[in-house]
Amino acid sequence: MNKQKYFAIVDIETTGSHAEGNRITEVAILIHNGKKITDRYQSLVNPQCPIPFAIQTLTGITPDMLENAPTFDEIAEDVYHLLQGKVFVAHNVNFDYSFLAKELKQAGYDWQATKLCTVRLSRKIFPGHRSYSLGNICKIRDIKITARHRALGDAEATAELFSQLIAQDKNQYLQESLHKNTEHRLPTHLSLAQFQRLPETAGIYIFRNKKGKIIYVGKAINIRKRVLSHFGGINTGLRRQQFINEIATIDFEESGTELMALLMECQMIKRHWPAHNRAMKRYEPKFVLIHYEDIRGYRRLAITKAVSHPNNMRYFETAQEANLFLTNLLEEFNFDPTLCTFYSPSTETREDRKVPVKILPSIEEHNRIIDSIFQQLHHRKRSFLLIDRGRNEEENSYVYFKEDKLYAFGFVAFVQQWSNVEDIVSYKDKCISNFYMQQIVLQYAERYPEKVNILSQMPMLS
């Protein structure tokens, strides 16, 4: 052990389980030089907020005990100087670190530290136990805890455990952790081996919990770098900490390109709807062009908020975009605007709304125009095959866009010559398309037209 390396062994008591919205009620810091404790610090802290009764029962710390205790701001300078330049050591280190980093930042101190987790070190140096909670591992190692769930008592037990870890560390796990501190940034239940198998290529990554259930799917240009970014910084929110602590294993699928990663992510989310993927719903279309027949027999067009409707014709992200599209149809085909409904936040799309009295065209004439509009819109539907690089030099990726909808995407052996879309497209690659995925493909095709193969005569794939 390097004699110049000092460790701050820390334990805190708090008003709750996550740093955001909760405060510290007690802090203990023991400075350890790798052989023994050289300095001690302990203080109760007035959290300036209520303490749940369950927490009072667990710790024995009551509001009366903290009434005259200093606030964290009042001890922040002492805490900062004790921690500054030291390796931060704790049992389940990210919990204690997140609270202290938040409190120090609020007090005006910019503090960061290398972290060591005695849970992770214990699993490596003392393998084979079912539980590595502080109480259980101290019982196994015959370490006495003088005051359980009090900061100083738990810190002293952690310091004794740390000394035993140093003494029994025949494989130099601690030195390895100090030189490559990535492991101690990972969630407690996620092994370093799980992280190290991740590639530094484009693709998707899949977080699973202990039961193997998918809880989150993400995309990345560099899978390993993106996964590690989830565990950086100070994660103080309850939802965020619950998410991080739930991760037990990581799977991945390489994609070759960013486009394929985006599509693979969307497809996986739509199939499994993981609990922590909430953003995807924001990308659903907001407005739609529909057609219907009124009680007089006129076939009408209307812009309305996007709903499940059997006669949806085209989707739009904004009302302005939708209304402009309908306006252009009116001008191009010169049909009566009275028989159309534009979207306005102050009105509803209703057939029985009062409209100015005017002479309407004949039903037959009007409906013939609507038929021609339908034919033109169908004729203008885009169909193309987008061919790009694959996951290796022996394959290509492809995206099949059929009649304004994403139909399939996947990977094929290197494409040199093809004359029919069926030569490339596999039925197993047919996808569950949505508005967001379609927009991704269209934007990519516009950005890279040299990768797009326009298909005029479409073979019938069912």
Image: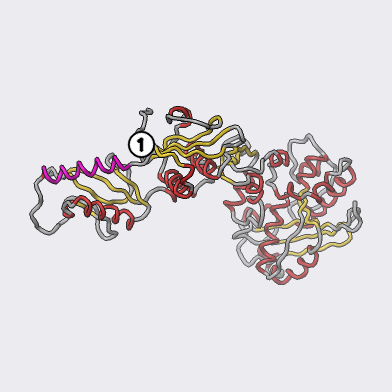
Position of 27 with respect to 425 (left or right) is right
92 or 324, which lies in front? 324
Give yes or no for residue 379 being in the magenta stretch: yes
**Number of numbered discs present?**
1
Provide residue 251's location: percent of width, then percent of height. Answer: 62, 37
Residue at figure coordinates x 26%, y 52% from the top left:
326
The residue under label 1 is 456
Q: Main secondary structure of the magenta part?
A: helix
433 or 69, which lies in front? 433
Provide residue 424's location: percent of width, then percent of height. Answer: 47, 30
Provide residue 128's location: percent of width, then percent of height. Answer: 78, 34
Specify the amino acid type for callout 1.
Answer: Ser
Residue at figure coordinates x 70%, y 61% from the top left:
100
254 or 13, which lies in front? 254
Provide residue 136's location: percent of width, then percent of height. Answer: 77, 42
Give yes or no for residue 43 being in the magenta stretch: no
Q: In the figure, 204 relative to 287: above or below?
A: above
Q: What element does badge 1 sit on?
A: loop
The magenta region covers: 364-380
Position of 116 with respect to 357 (left or right) is right
Q: Residues within 10 Å of mark 1 (few under 14, many from 20)?
A: few
Residue at figure coordinates x 32%, y 58% from the top left:
320
Position of 263 with respect to 155 (left or right) is left
Position of 56 with respect to 361 (left or right) is right
Give residue 202's quadrant in the image. Answer: top right
Q: Quadrant of the C terminus?
A: top left
Residue at figure coordinates x 78%, y 60% from the top left:
28
